[in-house]
Amino acid sequence: MAYSLGIDTGGTFTDVVLLNAQRQVVASAKSLTTRFDLAQGIAGALDQLPQAWLGQVSLVSLSTTLTTNSVVEGKGSPVCVLLAGYDALQVKSSGLVDLLGNEGIVCLPGGHDAGGIATQALDEAASRAAITQHMGRVSAFAISATFGVRNPEHEVQLRQWVQEMCDVPVTCGHELASSLGAPRRALTAALNARMIFHVKALIESVQRTLAARAIDAPLMVVQGDGSLINVASALRRPVNTVLSGPAASVLGACALSGLQNAVVADMGGTTTDIAVVRNGLPELSFDGAMVGNWRPMVEAVKVYAVGLGGDSEVRLHGGDGLTIGPRRVVPLSLLAHQHPHVLAALERQQHETPHASQMRFAQRLHADAALLARLNDDELFAWETLAQGPVDLERANMENRALARAIARLERKGLAIYSGFTPSDAAHVLGLSSHWSSAGATFAARIWARQMRHMYGLGTWKQGDAIGPAQDVVAKVVDTICQKLIEAGLNDAGQMNESSAGKVAALLTAMALGGGKAAALASASPDAPSAGGSAVFQLQFSPSMPLVGVGAPASSYYPAVAQALGVELQLPPFAEVANAVGAVLGQVSQRVHLTLTQPARGVFKVFTAQGPVDFGDLASAVAHAQALAGAEAHARAMAAGAAQAEVVYSQRNNSVNNDIDGNVFFEAVVTATASGAPLRKA
């Protein structure tokens, strides 16, 4: 019997499953993700599976939330973005400064107009000077030129110069997106470049682990739309894996629950991902899915990916009060489980005067050669110190302030991670979870409660109480999940965008969660209607769309969420490894879009990778676009690992029909989609 092996590497756990030929789960396992050496966590999970069956694996597929997490948390490798023809306003609106800082952005002469005609020649001397300045200090280059999707020659030329001068990956905007919108295309290219190192490290870890166990089946990677690609394609376009984990979880949730219509909510260590499924398929977002605060031009499953997970830090955020996430920290229950000696420090700290360094231990997160090359002597010393184990920042602040400050800089750069109080800790205090150190979680709850009360004036918990603070944190998690489910529902209904939905959902959540919240709102606002008596109307989820909860923490929080919202809940078997199940259920699928316009009556222009081509009639232009797109889509599908591929075409027209001019054609997007099953080991 041939088996399929699914692997999901998340921020906290690495999950593995074996599926038989009937796509039934026959074995599963979990292991802690070891970010500093991913191979250890992958090996730890694989070693729990029946070893005799591993030799019969004919396909391996990998999904991951690491790329999603890096976008949500704003972490990634250092890159240089070369922008040809961009002005200051375009750079500002792109979000690149927030993502990279000014140092990694270089604006150069160049670019094209909407017709694909160069507006200014590239300056080779200035371009080579910029490449020289940044090579050796970055892990990759990203390139974007204005109207590069209409004529990519400047992006191609800049890529050639980078490849001549240094041996680092280069990514171009026109390879990742076909839509206009230079600022977002530049952001997408930058995000792609930042992920190359991390995706490469993950793939190499999986390959080493499989080779050590003599598993030589083809290795595929899940894209954000749920389709599969081989590792070579994933390394060229890692940004397409930015919603790999959420896409796999949706596929896995549908398969495990057997439902064709549902709201899927996947809660992991770093994010909660929500998607609406109809007729067994999640809706795709062709304009780019919202991931944290970013919307890259990535065709992906339409999800709400928010920075709320079991390992999200519970903290005070300005006037918003208690906030959870988006920063991921190491739960104190996990830290004490792995390093029992920290319990003594936590036990002592619960009786000390509260201050910000309590509960703060620092650990190495992962190694990034480009980032390490930029460290100064203090930071290198801190890096070596962290190699010896967790560093108590309370003690470091008292005994070696330079070390503490250097560790803080490592954390901001994504090389180190702090510990902190999290929903996972609260769940351990309340007995909802028990796989890590409950004593560490209890000490942390007491310390955190004292910090909130004495430093910020938040809470009324009694001295030494761990239950009350934990209950409030769990209630906040439930409240936040409810609000995000309502936001997703509002957006799915097409009534409002994410920004508007977020504002309205807070009020609707308060109404949905009952009279206590409504009364609190009424007392805070004299103009609010009275909370007494029967409600005028109620918020209700559709009974035909049950909630399917998956992910390791799902059983701790989703029963309360379902009860609060009055929605049917399913926690299917193997829900905790749904991502790994979904990883092996997809097909290889590649889409190619070509745009054609009518800039003047009787002239139809097709924008190809080699530049624009003119035709005298629409039918000829469409036929040429279909031929090019179909050939490219088929070639990409085969190169991405399909055993064979079929091509289907679609066309989206922009035209106007009026009484004077009749039917006037302006623009069309021709799409070719090539799909097929992945190639398996014979």
Image (cartoon, rainbow, N blue to C red):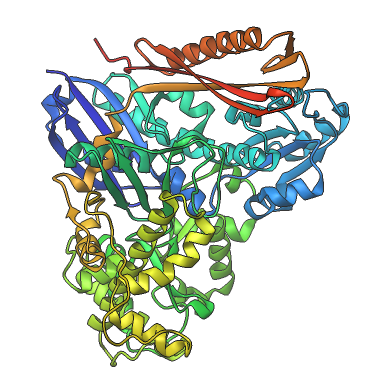
State the quadrant of the C terminus.
Answer: top left
534 lies above or below 237: below
Task: Pick whichever, 620 or 594, lies toward us.
Answer: 620
Task: Pick whichever, 265 or 416, lies toward us.
Answer: 265
Q: Residue at x 74, y 47 (%)?
A: 91
Residue 614, percent from left and from top? 75, 11
> Across the whole image, how many numbered discs are drawn on residues?
0
Residue 196, percent from left and from top? 53, 35
Asked which quadrant contains residue 458, the reply is: bottom left
Residue farthest front in this picture: 659
48 lies above or below 419: above
543 lies above or below 133: below
Q: Residue at x 64, y 49 (%)?
A: 374
Residue 174, percent from left and from top? 64, 27
Residue 172, percent from left and from top? 65, 29
Asked which quadrant contains residue 364, the reply is: bottom left
Q: Residue at x 27, y 22 (%)?
A: 59
Q: Is residue 324 visible?
A: no
State the quadrant of the N terminus.
Answer: top left
Task: Pick whichever, 157 or 306, lies toward us.
Answer: 306
- Horizontal side of 660 relative to 176 (left or right) equals right
Q: Is residue 607 visible?
A: yes
- Horizontal side of 384 relative to 542 (left or right) equals right
Asked which quadrant contains residue 653, the reply is: top right
